[in-house]
Image: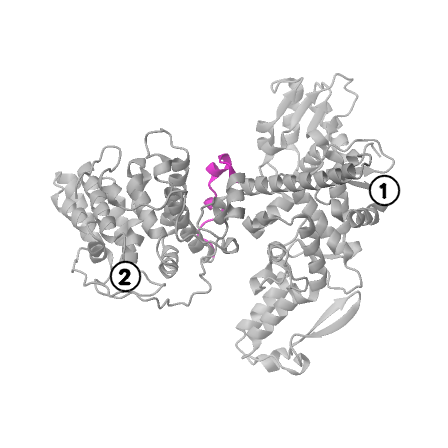
Amino acid sequence: MGGRGLAGGFTGTLASIPGLRHGRELPPICSDVRQKQRLSIDTLPPEVKAPFPSDPVIPLRTKTTKEFQEDMERAVQSGDWREVREFYLTTFDSFIEMNAAFKREANGLFNTIDDSGVNAKFVNAVYDALLSTPQDIQKSVLKGIINSLLREWKGPRTKDDLRAYFILVQNPQYSSTSTYVIYAHLLRQIAALSEADHHFLVHWLKKLSPRRFRQLVERLLQFISTRLFPAEPDELPPLSKCSWWIPSATKVLSLFNAANSVSSPPIMPFTDFYNITLEHIDFMEEYRTWQNYGNSNRFSFCQFPFILSTVVKKAIIQKDSEQQMISQARQSLVSKVSRRQRVDMNLLFLNIKVRRAQLLSDSLDELTRKRCDLKKKLRVTFVGEAGLDMGGLTKEWFLLLVRQIFHTDYGMFTYIKDSRCHWFSSWKCDNYSEFQLVGTLMGLAVYNSIALDIHFPLYCYRKLLTPPTVPCDQNALVGMATATLDDLQQIMPELAHGLGELLSYEGNVEEDFYLTFQVFQEEMGVVKSYNLKPGGDKIPVTKQNRKEYVQLYVDFLLNKSIYKQFAAFYHGFHSVCASDALMLLRPEEVEMLVCGSPELDMSALQKAAQYEGYSKTETTVRCFWDVVLAFPLELQKKLLHFATGSDRVPVGGMADLNFKISKIDVSTDWLPISHTCFNQICLPPYRTRKELKHKLTIAISNAEGFGLE
């Protein structure tokens, strides 16, 4: 073992650990983009019967957590670290010794996904104490890890090897960039394990304490960020010589993400896996790599979309949309020129012309006639009104249309008070084009970066991603997402509660509930019956088959009874948003892109505001913010709508609005004016808070259209 140095990390010996091929490659990378966050956890059996070599006999070590802590206390008090030093030197010198120290029973098998066999309390105590030991002990631990990794870098893995990796990845020393070379090689070995090994690690990781789990996730995210953007150019090896670092770390991070996903409830919010640093890389190059090399070992962050923030995903969708818009417009232009026809610049836009009094029917007609233009830039004109659409009229068109479509009197959607959301009406009809219109509207909103005030349950967005791209087979089913009682709870909590009571009932289910596999629904005032399975009206619900009854009933309510409505809605959405980028999204992220955020933070808007003709310290501006910050939520939403044309906050937050307050030199008798296409409010030089509040309240309360009515 020659040539180890500790200044600025380890050198020499590490060069003998074989690296991966250059070009940011890492075998095995999940090559099917549709598998993205999934590691086949659901498809593997509970006990993975992969061929593991026999575990070696583990030496007997009997030190307990309490004894170790007493050793530490004596060392701190006396300054004699010999016993502690010997423990650390021996423990981290090999995988066998790690198992001897931390395995609850030295030669116990522990070959299950449910129990790693590791004494977590002891591991935590040893690692918590490590950073307070003298530097020579900390260095000896790192040397021991190098020896272990060199010894174990190839060959078949035993369960004890997996346990050693599980223990090593928790080492807090990897927070320092001086240890990143060692950390990278550990991550490389873990990333290159088999799928069966990963399956075990995922289930062991989810048993970590939430605090420890979060620490390890944050350490991996920091490692990736620092490798991409090191604080000092020379603190890490050149990226060209260690291109496998980031793929290795990302693959290991995906194991933590999988562990988080299979935990109920999740250990930490999925948004905490976002790496904000990636907002500053060329993510479109990552996207193109993913599209072009999706079925190869070529690495792209898009293979692991859990790490990309919604801001990045929105930007990818927008740029992908822009490219499609440009392509559509270019095709129209070339077609005209080739036929020597006069070029009308309106060809570059999806021009929607509607009457306010006939808003819904006109919109449906326009979108139906111009379905080939849906991927062009949207431009709206209200008949009989002045105004060039620079974005403001488009926002208003969306807002008014959504209000009308989702009004309870219209009947397309049912508003459920208990869950405060809308759901599809199950009435049958000959034409579902209006449901397709709603889907198209949602697609156009995402395509044109407009936030809609729509209240669908999360399950609706899961259905929209089932599948995320439209099948080539026109007869293929769409939107048939697996439905559970928890999904029904989001939408119809009262019914879900009743079905839950049926499942837990201890008495005679058949006699006391008197149910059959037939259900009833009211449609347009008429009660209709439906069999959940053939002959369902003659099959009683019993204690033995009640789970099947609940499963079929939930599937009927959320899928089969509204299939035609949702299929039209699905195809409307995907007629606009037909993009591979949708495969990057979680249902929660689709909801955010469609709806924006309902959380209004006016203090954040104040911090991000820009000024023209005013400074932020002038009386009028100070009065404005005093008034706005004191407004109730309803008036704050009206103000946002007045200034921007929408009462929703975009994905990037208030800062993304580019909100501006401008001065207009007119009489203070005037009301404030807005330019929604520029997210701008123009204020006369009001002198008092009372005057400004009065005029602003009138303006924002009468902001629909181009005049006060």
Asked if 665 appears above or below 337 in the picture, the reply is: above
**Image quadrant for the N terminus?**
top left
Q: Earlier in the sequence, mark 1 or mark 2?
A: 2
> Does residue 112 belong to the magenta stretch?
no
**Image quadrant for the C terminus?**
top right
Asked if 506 appears above or below 650 in the picture, the reply is: below
Which residue is at the front of the view, 510 or 213? 213
Determine the residue positioned at 73% across, 34% down. Answer: 392
Determine the residue positioned at 26% across, 65% down. Answer: 53
* Labels 1 and 2 touching (C-beta < 8 A): no
Protein image colouring: one colour
Q: Is residue 97 left or right of residue 583?
A: left
> Does residue 269 belong to the magenta stretch?
yes
Asked if 157 appears above or below 344 in the picture, the reply is: below
Residue type highlighted by circle 2: Thr
Q: Is residue 275 left or right of residue 15?
A: right
Instruction: Give coordinates of residue 649: x percent, y percent.
Output: 63, 38
| Element carrying mark 2 | loop
Q: Give the extent of the magenta segment.
A: 265-283
| Element carrying mark 1 | loop
- Label 1 Cα crowd, 10 Å radius (few <14 / some 14-19 / many 20+): some
Residue occupied by mark 2 = 158
Residue occupied by mark 1 = 355
Q: Is residue 538 left or right of residue 701?
A: left
